[in-house]
Amino acid sequence: MKIIFLGTGTSQGVPMIAHPSGGCDLKNPKNWRTRCSVHIEMGGVHIQIDAAPEFRMQCIQNQIEALDLFVLTHAHADHVMGMDDLRRFCDLNGGSAIPVYSTTNGLLRIQAIFPYAINDKPVSIGYPAFQLNEMPKVLETKGGKMESTLLPHGSIDVLGLVFTEKESGKRIAYFTDCKAITEEAYALSEGIDLLVIDGLRPNVHPTHMTINEAVACAERIGAKQTLLTHMTYFVDYEETNADLPESISLAYDGLVLNL
């Protein structure tokens, strides 16, 4: 199983409009963050999680050339606005619609933003088409399964996802954009190989976990490895990593892990 971190930042990431460094060392490329999304290859199945506004460039920079299904964790702009660029994968899939999974709220937002793409197939070559599906508790694919749970994120819930590859048995939990981990999510992620978790910044935020809150959740889960994601300009890669426990570190754009 492979995970590719296309983006690990927020709309207040680094560099930031009118405040480019925010205290981060911009000579370190790991401090340059596009908005948050990952690509997972599980038993030959290519799964895209979220589409940041920079999604097209993320795909080019990370050589993403195949996509079988798409999951939208939630419908905030920094996760949904790149979906129009899924059009290229419709062409690469022989003119088929991309299966899209999300919450009820997420699907409604997709319909509102991309009404021209809600079709069984693209209206023409070069157009997007989305086959919308409510995310089930368990989604089976030929490469393994995805389990989903809801996590609190302000006034909405987001999808927390746990991937289990059929052949290897390796497991990844992806918990982005959340204020807390629920008991159900703790149970799903027990014994996980890799935990990816929201660690926005050092100071308190009403809808995201702080670095310390994320670390506390990670220590309870006890993953073999934990990576924090969705960081703002408050978080310098080297300085923050130096203070984290041994099995916990920051993700960065372009990071590729093979489990």
Image: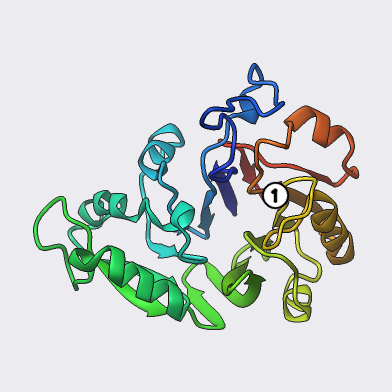
Looking at the image, is 48 positioned above or below residue 258? below
Residue drawn where x is 55% and y is 45% of the image = 4
Residue 49: give x, y in percent of width and height.
49, 58
Quarter in which the N terminus is drawn: bottom right
Q: Secondary structure at mark 1?
A: loop
Q: Is residue 252 left or right of residue 209?
A: left
Residue drawn where x is 59% and y is 73% of the image = 155
Task: Locate residue 98: give its quadrant.
Answer: bottom left
The colour scheme is rainbow
Q: Is residue 49 left or right of residue 196?
A: left
Is residue 185 in view? yes
Single out the residue that lies furthest toward the top: 27
Single out the residue that lies furthest toward the front: 18
Residue 128: give x, y in percent of width and height.
22, 58
Mark 1 Cα within 10 Å, few/some/many (few <14, many 20+)?
many
Observer-nearest residue: 52 or 1? 52
The amino acid marked with disc number 1 is Leu
Task: Locate residue 65: give its quadrant.
Answer: top left
Task: Locate residue 13: give its quadrant.
Answer: top right
Total labels: the figure holds: 1
Residue underneath mark 1: 200
Residue drawn where x is 72% and y is 56% of the image = 205
Residue drawn where x is 72% and y is 26% of the image = 23
Observer-nearest residue: 176 or 138? 176
Is residue 45 in view? no
Looking at the image, is 160 positioned above or below residue 80? below
Residue 44: give x, y in percent of width and height.
47, 57
Residue 123: give x, y in percent of width and height.
10, 63
